[in-house]
Structures are given as C-alpha cells and as structure tokens.
Amino acid sequence: MLRVLDGERLFPPPIWLMRQAGRYLPEYKATRAEAGGFLDLCYSPKLATEVTLQPIRRFGFDAAILFSDILVVPHALGQTVWFAEGEGPRLEPVTLDGLGGLDLDGMLGRLEPVLETVERIRAALPAETALLGFCGAPWTIATYMIAGRGTPDQGPARRAALTDPEGFARLMDLLVDASVAYLVAQLKAGADAVQIFDTWAGSLDDEGFERWAIQPVARIVAGVRAVVPGARIIGFPKGAGARLPEYVRRTGITAVGLDWQVPAVFARDNVQTLVPVQGNLDPLRMVVGGEALDRGVDHVLEMLGHGPLIFNLGHGITPDASPEAVSRLVARVRAARL
Ligand code: CP3
C-alpha cells in the first residue's frame, strides 16, 4: 500500500475498507459490548487495538486503520460529545462567539490513550500491513460541532458560515491547528499514512468548497509536512465530483479517496493522472453480494487498475454488510488479472 501511495502501480492492487472494524463483524459487537460506551472503546488502548486488528486477522487486509472516531477531536477540545445507542453522535452545540471554551493546549493530553493505541497496533501488526491514522476534515467536524448531530444537508453549519464568516473562520483555524497536532502525533506514534475524512464536502457551493474544504486541508497538509517531511496524506472529499482535480492540486494530498458516485472514467482521466486513487465500490454491493458484488469489483479494476490504485469502498461499510461478501471481495481482487 505504501508503494502505491508513493506512485507505483501494483496489480492486483492493495485493499482495505473504510469502517472495516465495525458492527457487521460479530467479534466487533462482542468487544463493543465489553467496552460499554462507544467513546470508552475509542479511549481504551487495549480494546481499540483489539477491534483494529479483528478485520486484519479475518480478511488479511493490506492496511489497518486506527479504531477511533473523528469526533474525539471536539471531545478532546472540551465539547460535550456522546453516542446515543442507535442514534449516532450527539454534541452540546458550540456557538461561534463561544469558542473560547475550547482548549487546544489540553487536547493532545486527552488524546493520549488514542496515541497509545497507535503504538500498540503498530507493535502488533505484521510488518507488511500498513497502519493508517486519520482525522475528520475541519468542515465535516464543524458540521457536527455546530448542529450537535448529523443533519441531512449540513444546514446549520452552512448557515453559520454564511451568516458569520469571520466567526466560522476562527472555528476552522482552531480545527486546522488541532488536526495538524493530532496527525503529527499519530505519525510519530507509528502511523505510516493518515487519511482526512471530509464526508460532507459535497454540501458546499463553489465559494464554500474553496474556503472551507480546500483551504483548511491545504493548510493541514503543509502544517503536517513542516514537521514530518514527506508525510503521506490521503484526502477523502466525499461528493467533490468534478472538483476533485482542483482539490488534489491545491491541497497537495498524496492520494485521494473516491466516493462511488464519481464516474470511474472521469477519475481515470482527470484524477489518477495526478495522484494515486482509492476506491470506489458502492458499499451497498457489500450488502447484496453475489453477482452484483462481482460486477462492481470488476468495473473498478478494469477502469482504475491500469494506474496506481488502492482498492476500497466509496464510503464506509455498513452494519448490514455480510462478512462473507467481504471475503468474496478480497478473494476476487487478489485473484484478478487484467
Ligand atoms: O474501521 C474504521 O474505519 C475506523 C474507525 C472509524 C469510525 N468512525 C468508527 C465508528 C472511522 C475512520 C470513523 C470516521 C467517522 N466518524 C466519519 C468519517 C467517515 C464516514 O464514515 O463518513 C464520520 C462522519 C464519523 C462520525 C460518526 N461516528 C457517525 C456519523 C457515527 C454514527 C453512524 C454509525 O455508523 O453508527 C459514528 C459512530 C461510529 N464510528 C461507529 C463506528 C464503528 C459505530 C458506533 C457503534 O459501534 O455503536
């Protein structure tokens, strides 16, 4: 996987799946129950290491991703965050004139258990398995910090950014600094590369995408590389579509994750010419399995397998996906010939 991130084409391509540790796995559910709350799992080095390794043991993926959540950053900044069973994340919303309550200086100390998890995973992983760290992009984190929950159209954050752009820029500046510190700490603790998840990048218009998706991530990339030269950073601006080439050029990311709505022919001709790509099987094919899965896999390989590719889904695997479908996927990718 690191060779592909460095620009090489390998075929069959390396493979890992977003959310590969999760509720579709019975062993995850067992460890999750043992931990109690979801945040307790994220902050337990022993149990978070265990769930990170579960999909590696079962499927032999080429990369492990640190088990944590993007919302540990606002939590470690001092915002109240909790995970309501079956409802997703909940946060005590922040207001743009109340950012003084957030504490950047204390953040890394509170994230110490997560950094210990990175060290433990690296020590336990086979040498040939890459370890990925991650954070949420400032825009996506801000959508949760402002709304206090997931929203269908990220309306509360978009409204805040239009109503008070200076106040919103202060929140983004804080999240850029927090992300640089957190990613540098993960790389120093043993992560081989990091991914920046901008799940809600697609909800922004031209001005918003430039200011809140491109610029903050460009600053994170530069800030991390100022401390860790050559740091490998994967961007995942979900919903960026035709804006992907500009996003890649302007942010300086090493590789880019493609969601499943990006036409593969567009990605091949306009994105993979710039950087290695990662993706982009529709996660629903992991639920349906069978022929639908095989056709989807073959399409990704035929379209993107002629250049540097990391095989992945176009978004996280869902709780209703079947572990058998994942085994079938891995076997098909590993047996592929072009
Ligand atoms: O295996 C991995 O990929 C690593 C772990 C990981 C989680 N969340 C674990 C998790 C990663 C990389 C994330 C990122 C994340 N978290 C994102 C960006 C990527 C994406 O999927 O869009 C976002 C937007 C979040 C915020 C978040 N966390 C939401 C919206 C939810 C609820 C939805 C859901 O799937 O339940 C979570 C909870 C969460 N994060 C779970 C897991 C395994 C499920 C919680 C549980 O086990 O009860």
Image: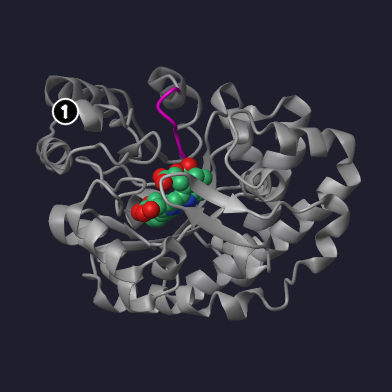
Residue 43 in picture, x, y percent from top left: 45, 72
Q: Where residue 291 appears, x then y in whole percent?
A: 13, 20
Residue found at x 25% / y 55%: 62
Q: Is residue 284 above or below residue 104?
A: above
Please identify the quarter of the rendering in which residue 99 is found: bottom right
- Could you tell me which residue is drawn at 40 percent across and 18 percent down? 265
Within 8 Å: ligand 1 and the Cβ of disc 1?
no
Say which quarter of the image contains residue 41.
bottom left
- Residue 258 forms part of the magenta stretch: yes
Tell me the magenta residue range. 257-261
Tell me if I can see residue 244 in this picture.
yes
Q: Does the magenta portion include 307?
A: no
- Label 1: how many residues lie within 10 Å, few (<14), some (14-19) or many (20+)? many
The front one of 257 and 73 is 73
Q: Residue furthest front?
A: 85
In x, y percent, where is residue 25? 21, 51
Q: Is residue 49 above or below residue 25?
A: below
Which color scheme is applied? one colour
Residue closest to the eye, 108 or 221: 108
Q: How many marks?
A: 1
Q: Determine whether, in the image, residue 12 is placed left or right of residue 275.
A: left
Q: Residue at x 62, y 44 (%)?
A: 140
Magenta portion: prevailing SS class: loop
Residue 60 at what x, y percent from top left?
17, 56
Q: State which quarter of the image contains the C terminus.
A: top left
Q: Secondary structure at mark 1?
A: loop
Q: Looking at numbered disc 1 in the image, what kind of residue is underneath it?
A: Gly
Q: Which residue was labeled with disc 1?
A: 289
Residue 254 seen anywhere in this rendered image of the structure: no
